Image: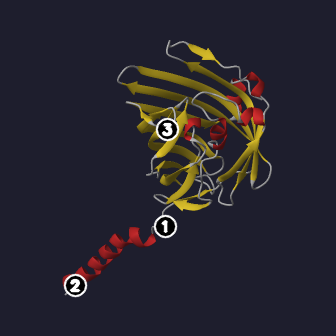
Amino acid sequence: MHRSGGAPGFLALLFLALLAPFSCGGPPPALDLQRSTDAPAVYQVSATSEASFYGSVSDLEGRTTLTAAFEAVPVSAATVEVEVLYLAASVEGANGEPAALGLGPLAGKRARLTFSPEGQVTQVEGDRELLEVQIPLMSVPALVEGLFPPLPGEETRADDTWNGNVPIPFPPLGDQPARAIYTLADVDPGTEPGSGAGTVEGHGLGVAPRSFEHAGVSGRGDLDLIFEGDYDSKMGYTRTERITRFDSTSLRLGDGNLYANGNVRLEQTTTTELLNPAERFGLGIE
């Protein structure tokens, strides 16, 4: 009798033990993905753009390399002022020799960014010398806007997604932004309230061909982008990398009546890092 009465009780305890992790585990960890407006921040940006033309007669290649540091100061909940601390770039032509561009006077120039309530950039304005400077294969407004990738502006859990605009880094493609979808790939909840971190991944949503025009050549092609960022609950994005590629599908010369036999590829890799005080001191940035 004792044995037959104990078995059901043992099985019941075993069943409850198996259910415990599922019934008491609670919701998965989350991060509050919102733009930080607490204090000024300094970002270092490294960008490399490459252009290539492959044709039946000849192949041409070019490269632009840029390094910069920007200080972002919150002005209000909806605006941030960005100042150039330094900006340098060089262009490498067909001979393979880099030629530095005279961008020193841009130090101290400023841009002001306006954000939507969700934390996405809606407007970039400021000093014309900065926003209209001509750098081959680079767009300075896109670099400034790229300091602040789109965020959902709310508590987000692993595998949640949101959409946002992405600035186009290549002037020949115009200034119509691309669309991207972002995913919170993983979450580390941290050991204290508000100390979590996570990784954000993104890719382009564009399916329609984009037009371009430059130096008497026009056409259409496909644009794609890949994004990865490290996000900290207290500091926002601490590091991001964005790769943007454009491949032409058709080329025209002059007034557009003559087709060209060849392919144009544009590619830019941009890395942005949030600098801590020690890193700023090491780079001579106060």
Query: Picture quarter containing residue 126?
Result: top right
Does 73 sit above or below residue 268?
Answer: below
Q: Distance from label 2 to label 1 (Cα)?
A: 41 Å
Mark 3 and mark 1 lie on one chain; the one further toward the N terminus is 1
Mark 3 and mark 2 lie on one chain; the one further toward the N terminus is 2
Query: Picture quarter containing residue 146?
Result: top right
Residue 236 x/y as whole percent: 63, 48
Residue 242 x/y as whole percent: 52, 40
Q: Amino acid at mark 3?
A: Ile
Question: Which is closer to the viewer, label 3 or label 1?
Answer: 3
Residue 113 x/y as whole percent: 73, 47
Q: Residues within 10 Å of mark 2 (few under 14, many from 20)?
A: few
Classify mark 2: helix, strand or loop.
helix
Q: Which residue is mark 3?
A: 243
Q: Which residue is mark 2?
A: 2
Q: Residues within 10 Å of mark 1 (few under 14, many from 20)?
A: few
Q: Residues within 10 Å of mark 3 (few under 14, many from 20)?
A: some
Classify mark 3: helix, strand or loop.
strand
At 46% from the left edge and 43% from the top edge, which residue is drawn?
223
Mark 2 and mark 1 lie on one chain; the one further toward the N terminus is 2
User: Do we see residue 39 in this rendering?
Assistant: no
Q: Are marks 3 and 1 in contact (CB under 8 Å)?
A: no
At 58% from the left edge and 62% from the top edge, which residue is drawn?
155
Q: Amino acid at mark 1?
A: Pro
Q: Which mark is residue 27?
A: 1
